Image (cartoon, rainbow, N blue to C red):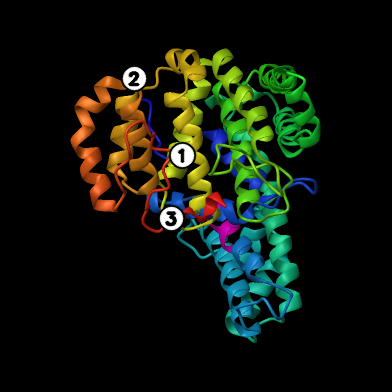
Amino acid sequence: MTSILVTPWRDGHALIRLRARLFPASNCPDLRHKACSQIQAWKLRGSLPHTIESTWYITEAILNDVTDVQTTTMSALALRSSYCTAFCRFVTGLLDSMQESHYKISMYDKARELRLPASFVELRHEAIHGEMPSLVVLRQAAQKALDWLQTNYWMQLEDDFAGAGLSSLGSGERYASMQEDLRKIVQQPPDPYVLASAKRAGDIDNQSRIMFESILKILEDSNGGKQASAEFIDILFDQWMLATSGGDSITAMPHASRGGFRRDGWTDDIYNYWDPVLKLLALHRPHFLRMLSDVMTKHLTAQPTWASSTETFKGSMFRGLDRIYTAPDWVKAYGQSGLSGLEMVSRCLQSPNGWTVRLAASISECPRHVRVKRAFGQRICQSMKTLGIGNRAAGESASDVPEKLGPVSMAMDD
């Protein structure tokens, strides 16, 4: 009889993406904080393998180890305790899992079976029964522990999931190559002045098509189907979130006001470049738009806990979703995607905030979503009153009026 194993993650690809964030290449953005948040969310769903938990605890200890005394929030003793706890839990949990005999087996023997360095057992014994090791020793041990976990667990994922469809993206090297190619495109948008010139010359569509063809070729060459599309969306949002939070990424981020993408003065020309690229991908990969819409909705309804959920970023998600569901030039892509205005408005009203209610109102006013207004008109009005969102004058759309959106400051439009 086939047994069913329920895991906190959706599939093997989710673990592969997590691995890329936990162990970023030198030319990739540092997304370890996001990886730790992802593991924490999985932990709420159920138990995790000891290797994943250990990677999380050790990575958190390393991220808390800020060498700049002026910016650190932890004392040296607290930092040593953090390292000790993470390291000792890693070694103890790993070796205890090997204790299957009725007779106690030496930790050194169990470590030898797992090819775990004997120095790990010695350091654990010293940390628990003797003096707490110095910070220098603990830093070195934590890095060696991460290296061991990367080699003996994370780099074996393709083999572990070989029978579960993970091979659809080919080998690990091929998957990593696809990630790198997509990241290069997303991280290096064209010069805004070149785009401005192309716009004046009426050549903006050609510029967008070049970008689209490059991305489509990478996705199709990977033979990854939906998983490849999901990886591209993840990379795209990683870069936008870094830009939103003031990171070092040079990617243009979606700007909440004027419907444009802006970073350091980059405005509508960048938006005019990305919008048709996403539209073309939606037309050529029918599943793409639903996946994109789901991710944008997740960020729009998220609680403001970290950079991806700041009001500026939510504003950009609102603009993008508003175009997908109401803009005339998105009608064809929307029609073949299977998206539903009724479903979107229902999701918005289940997580009401200034942006989601505003989006629900905009969709309800779109002529092709008449059923939405009939079904949710009263609830939308009630939600607007509850949140203190003002009434619009006749002829004005939900995105044109600087309304009071609770904690959202309309100064973003400056």
Return the residue nearer the eye: 386 or 85: 386
**Which amino acid type is marked by label 2?**
Pro
Say which of marks 1 and 2 sits in front: 2
Q: Is residue 130 above or below residue 381?
A: below
Q: What residue is disc 1 on?
A: 318
Near mark 1 (Cα within 10 A), the count class, few <14, some 14-19 or many ≥20, is: many
Q: What residue is disc 3 on?
A: 408
Query: Which quadrant of the figure contains the N terminus?
Result: top left
- Image point 65% across, 49% down: which residue? 243
Q: x%, y% of residue 160?
A: 59, 35
Q: x%, y% of residue 332?
A: 48, 12
Q: Is residue 305 located in the magenta-colored stretch of the structure?
A: no
The rendered magenta stretch, by its main secondary structure, is classed as: helix
**Which amino acid type is marked by label 3?**
Val
Mark 3 and mark 2 in contact? Answer it, CB < 8 Å. no
Q: x%, y% of residue 66?
A: 69, 72
* Residue range of the region highlighted in magenta in the rendering: 51-57
Q: What residue is disc 2 on?
A: 367
For label 2, the SS is helix
- Image point 34% across, 17% down: which residue? 368
| Number of numbered tags placed on the structure image | 3
Q: Can residue 117 be seen in this view?
A: no
Return the residue nearer the eye: 372 or 167: 372
Near mark 2 (Cα within 10 A), the count class, few <14, some 14-19 or many ≥20, is: few
Label 1, label 2: how far apart the Cα atoms are: 19 Å
